[in-house]
Image: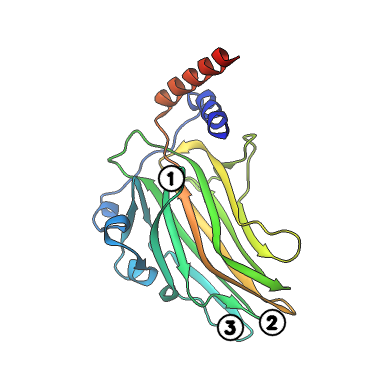
């Protein structure tokens, strides 16, 4: 039912809103590493070799990926060498990445933080596809006592405009996942992308803190991006869905 509501919502607005452009450069296509075929790779190698990662119809690239590492209270400083990137596909069939981190933990009086950023393109071999959803899941992580582990994510278009909206199509400032013992433990978040895009930018702020008497860690999280048909096809599918609803009624 959620998928049908999404389909109808996008069909209504697809013809009225401008779509993002697919500005895939030739340089982006020169050094592709197919994660599904070649297997996991360390983020340090991705950066050193200036690789473009591919999973299904999605390309992932950034000239830095990792930045602004900080550590307090004697905790190990986060580094790209502790991060491994794998191909991931959600149960809905959305393609994306899984990040695994070794040793990203904070105990009493400790904290660590870093930024992870990358761009996502629809591969030019899939001109019919657009990005309509972004999903983030904290699949490995936890906290005890006063500890807190969290990831905040901004999603923008190529002009740095926020493109996230919620189920009611209201602007959504960011995605947020967190693990703690403060009555708010949220391991997954998602949002629609409007207008539909061929290219988006992801900026993550990832942190763990032990607080005054606790601990927290993050060992793995996933990121998935939907692929849906071009707006004309989407509108036809939505009309078919509307017809089916009327027949059922």
Tell me the residue at 54%/25% (across/down).
8
Q: Is residue 67 visible?
A: yes
Give SS at disc 1. Answer: loop
Tell me the residue at 62%/64% (across/down).
150
Tell me residue 21's x, y (percent).
39, 38
Q: How many numbered tags mark residues here?
A: 3
Vertical arrangement, residue 133 with respect to residue 219, above or below: above
Image-based side of 16 in relation to 46, left or right: right
Image-based side of 146 in relation to 224, left or right: right
Give SS at disc 2. Answer: loop
- Residue under pointer 3: 75
- Residue under pointer 2: 108
Quadrant of residue 113 in the image? Answer: bottom right
Tell me the residue at 47%/36% (across/down).
196
Give SS at disc 3. Answer: loop
> Whole-Å distance between the Cαs marked 3 and 1?
35 Å
**The N terminus - image quarter:** top right
Task: Give the numbered dot on residue 94.
Answer: 1
Tell me residue 96's x, y (percent).
42, 52
Vertical arrangement, residue 45 with respect to residue 13, above or below: below
> Whole-Å distance between the Cαs marked 2 and 1?
38 Å
Q: Is residue 147 visible?
A: no
């Amino acid at each position: 039912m959620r998928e049908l509501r999404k389909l109808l919502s996008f069909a209504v607005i697809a013809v009225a809103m401008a779509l993002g452009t697919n500005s895939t450069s030739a340089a982006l296509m020169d050094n592709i590493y197919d994660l599904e075929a070649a297997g996991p790779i360390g983020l340090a190698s991705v950066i050193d070799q200036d690789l473009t990662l591919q999973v299904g119809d999605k390309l992932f690239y950034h000239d830095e990926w990792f930045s602004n590492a900080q550590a307090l209270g004697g905790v190990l400083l986060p580094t790209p060498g502790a991060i491994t990137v794998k191909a991931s596909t959600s149960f809905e069939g959305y393609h994306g990445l899984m990040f695994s981190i070794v040793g990203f933990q904070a105990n009493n009086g400790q904290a660590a933080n870093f930024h992870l950023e990358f761009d996502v393109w629809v591969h030019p071999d899939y001109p019919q596809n657009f990005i309509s959803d972004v999903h983030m899941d904290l699949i490995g992580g936890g906290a005890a006592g006063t500890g807190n582990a969290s990831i905040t994510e901004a999603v923008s278009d190529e002009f740095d405009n926020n493109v996230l909206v919620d189920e009611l199509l209201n602007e959504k400032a960011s995605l947020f996942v967190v693990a703690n013992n403060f009555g708010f433990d949220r391991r997954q978040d998602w949002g629609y992308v409007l207008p539909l895009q061929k290219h988006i930018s992801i900026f993550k702020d990832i942190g763990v803190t032990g607080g005054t008497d606790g601990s927290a860690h993050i060992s793995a999280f996933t990121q998935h991006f939907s692929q849906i048909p071009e707006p004309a096809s989407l509108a036809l599918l939505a009309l078919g869905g509307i017809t089916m609803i009327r027949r059922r009624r």
